[in-house]
Image (cartoon, rainbow, N blue to C red):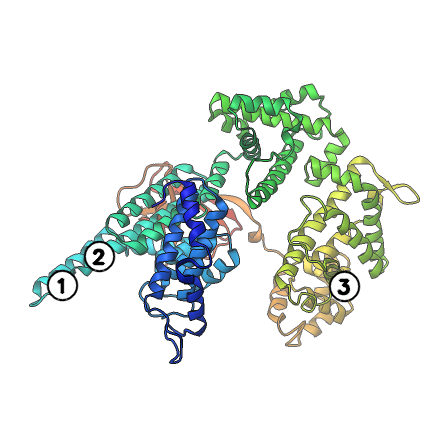
Amino acid sequence: MPTTPDAIAADITEAATAGFRGRLIARGQARAIIWRDGALPPDAPAFAPQLSYDLHSYAYALLGLGLRLRELGGDAAQARTAFEQAATALETVIAKGNRQEVDRDFHFVMAAASYHLAHLSARAYSLLTIVEAEENFSPIERVLAQLMRRNFGALRATVLDYRASGEGSDARIAAAIQANLDQAEGAANPVDGGSNFRFDGLDTALTDAFLAAMSLLRVALERGERPLLDQALDRLRVGLAICSELNMLPQWWAHRIAKRRNWEALITDLGAREMESGLVRPVAALLSRMRARIGSDLNQLIDYVVNNAAAWTFPEVANEEPEDRERALADWERHVATLDTAILSLIGENDIPDEGIEAALDDILQSSLWHRRLLRQNEQVQQVLRAGLVSRSRVIWSQSTTARRRGYFLAGVGLMTGHALDAIAADANLLLVQANGAILQSDGEAAIAAITALAERVFTFYPFTLDPMPANWRDILRAWLLGQPLAGIAAGQKSETLQFIEGGLVYRLPWAMEAIRVRAAANGDTVGVFDLPLEDHELGLAVPAVETGTLNRSASILIQAGFNSRLAAIKAVTDTGATFQTGQELRQWLNSEAVAAWSAQPDWPTAETRAMWTDFAQSFTPRENRTWADRRYWANAAWLGAPPPPGTPVQIHHWAGQPRVLSTDGTPLGTVQAALNPGRAGLLRAQVAQDVGRLDITYLGPADLSGA
C-alpha cells in the first residue's frame, strides 16, 4: 500500500488510465447500457459474472487513495481524479443494477459522496436528491446526504427525531438483545445465525452514536462553539475505530466520509465564527492569507502588514490550484469589503488625521466585542490583529477624502468598490437621473436604455459582478422591465436566467443604483444643464422598477406591498386601470368597488394566483406579531433525571406532540412546561437557567413562539 503522496498519486494515475484492468469502467458502462434491474437481455455479450464485484473493489480502492492523498496534503487534482473514477465505477453498477441488491443504497450514497468530493456538484446533487426522497435509506445514509447538501433543517429533524425516540438508547438495545437471548434459550434447535441480533444491536448503537455526533456538529455550527465540534469529531473517531475493529465496512466508510469530505471548510468557518465580532473575522482571514504567502512567523507578519504597501493586494500563493485561487480571491475581496465597511462605520464620518487613526479606533472599541475577543488571545495574536486593523484603516485614509469615505460608508461598500464608483460617477449620475425621468414620463424605451447603460458599468466590478453572466442578459433585463413573461427568453438556460434575475436584478443592480445615489449626495455631485444637486431630481422610481420587474409604478408598489406574483400584479393593475402612487392610495384601491368586482371572479387575477391574492387582500395590513425581533423568554422544565448545571446549552425539539428538552448530542433530558408553537418561523436558543427548574430562551423571530 503506498504511503507517500507521490506514490499514492502514481497509483491513482495508473488506475485512471483508460485501459486499466482490461478497460474495467468501459465494460461496466457498456453493460449498463443494456442492463435492466441487474438482468441482461438473452442476446447480450458475455460480461464477466464478477464485473460488479470488480467495479466495487476498484471504486473503494480509489476512494481510499483519494482520501489518503488529501489527508497527506498531496495533489488536490489527483485526489479529485480518484474520487471521480470511484463515483463513475459505482454508478455503472447502481444505475441499472438490481434494486434489491444488499448494500445498494450504501453504494448509492458513496457514489454521491465521491462525486461531491470530486467537486462535481451537479452529478452529486442528482443522486443526493434521490437519497432524500426515498424511504429505504438508513438514518446514517440519509444524514450523510443532508450534510453534503448543507440541508441543516432536514438534518436537525432527522437526527433529533431519532434521538428523541430513544430507538438507539442503551436500555432499548439491551432489552432487544435480552429478548432474543430468551427466545434462543427456549428454542429446541437454535440456528447458527442466532447471533445476528447482537450485530443488529451493535449497528443500532453505532447509528445512535453517529447521529449524536451530527447533533453536536449542528449545534456547534449554530452556536459557534469549537468544543462542541471537537466532541463531534471525537465521537466519529470512536465509531470509526469500532467499525474497523469489527470489520463493519459500510459503517466504516460512512464514518470516514463524514470525517473527510468538507470538514476543513466547516472547521475554518467555525474558527472564524468563534472569533467573530464584525471586525475580528475579516482581519483574521485576511492576515491568514498574507501569512500563507510569506510563510513567516507572527512578528514578521506584523512587520509585513505595517510596512508593506502591497500587503493589501491579493497575496498570490505558490502552486495553488486555479479553483482554490479563485475561491480565495473571492473570499479576499469579500473580507476586504467587510473590513472596510466596518472601519468606515466606526470612524468614516469623522475628519481624523492619519496619525490619530489608532487612538480613535482604540477609543471607540474600548469595551466592545472586538476588545473582549482580543483579550482572549495571547499578546502576539492581539498585536497582529491590531496591526491589521490599523494598517487597513491607514490605507483607506491615504486613498480617500472625508467626503468620499462618508459616501462609501453610506453606500455599504469598501475602498476598491468606492474607487470604482468614483470613476463612473459622472456618467452614472446622469444615467440614474435619465432612468427615473423616463419612467416619470412613461418613456419605457428611454428608461430601459438608461438602466441597461448603468448595468453595463456596474456589473464590471465587485460586489456587483455575477458569475455566470448570461450572454443575453440585456434581453433578459429588457423583458423583465417590460413586465413580460420570461419562459421564452429563458429556454435552454432556465437556471442561469433565474440566477441573473435574483442575484443581478433583484439584488445587485438596485444596490449599485442606491450606492451611486448616496455617494453622489455625500460628495455634493451636481447633474444636468442646470447643474442641480443629484438629490434634487426624482430618484425614487428606477430602483423599484428593477427590483420588481415592471416599469408600471402601481404594479411595482403592489409587488413591494407583498403580492409576490409579478405577472398577476401587472394584470390586476391593468384590469382595474389603477394609477396609485403611494401606500395610502394602494389601500384605497384595495377597498374600491372596482377591485371588489374583479375579486368576485373565481380566477382573478389568474387562476393560479387566486388563493395568493385572497390571502394578500385579507392580510395586507401587517400584524404586530410579524415583526422580527430579538426576544427573551423563560419556561419551566420537567427533567427526566438530575437537572443539568446552570448555563448548559440545550435543544428544544417537538416530539410526540410535546416540546422536549434534548442535550447538545440529542439525548432526551426532559420536557418544556409551556405551549410552544412547533411551526414558529424564527431561530431559538435555550440554556439551563440559574434556577435549574427553568430554561432561558433567546428567540430571534416574530411574536409566534407561544403555541397558545
| In this picture, residue 533 sits left or right of residue 478 | right
- Closest to the observer, 524 or 431: 431
Residue to which mark 3 is pinned: 482
Q: Choose mark 2 or mark 3, whichever is in front.
A: 2
Residue to which mark 1 is pinned: 192
In the rendered structure, find residue 229 and report the number of the disc placed on it.
Answer: none
Residue to which mark 2 is pinned: 199
Identify the residue shown where x is 67% and y is 44%: 463
C-alpha gap between disc 2 and disc 3: 66 Å
The amino acid at mark 3 is: Leu
Identify the residue shown where x is 43% and y is 67%: 95
x, y percentage for residue 170?
23, 51
Q: Residue furthest right?
A: 529
Q: Earlier in the sequence, mark 1 or mark 2?
A: 1
x, y percentage for residue 585?
75, 59
Please tell me how crowded label 2 is: few (under 14), some (14-19), or many (20+) other residues with Cα within 10 Å: few
C-alpha gap between disc 1 and disc 2: 14 Å
Please tell me how crowded label 1 is: few (under 14), some (14-19), or many (20+) other residues with Cα within 10 Å: few
- Closest to the observer, 612 or 355: 355
**What is the count of numbered marks?**
3
x, y percentage for residue 468?
64, 54
Specify whether residue 595 is in view. yes
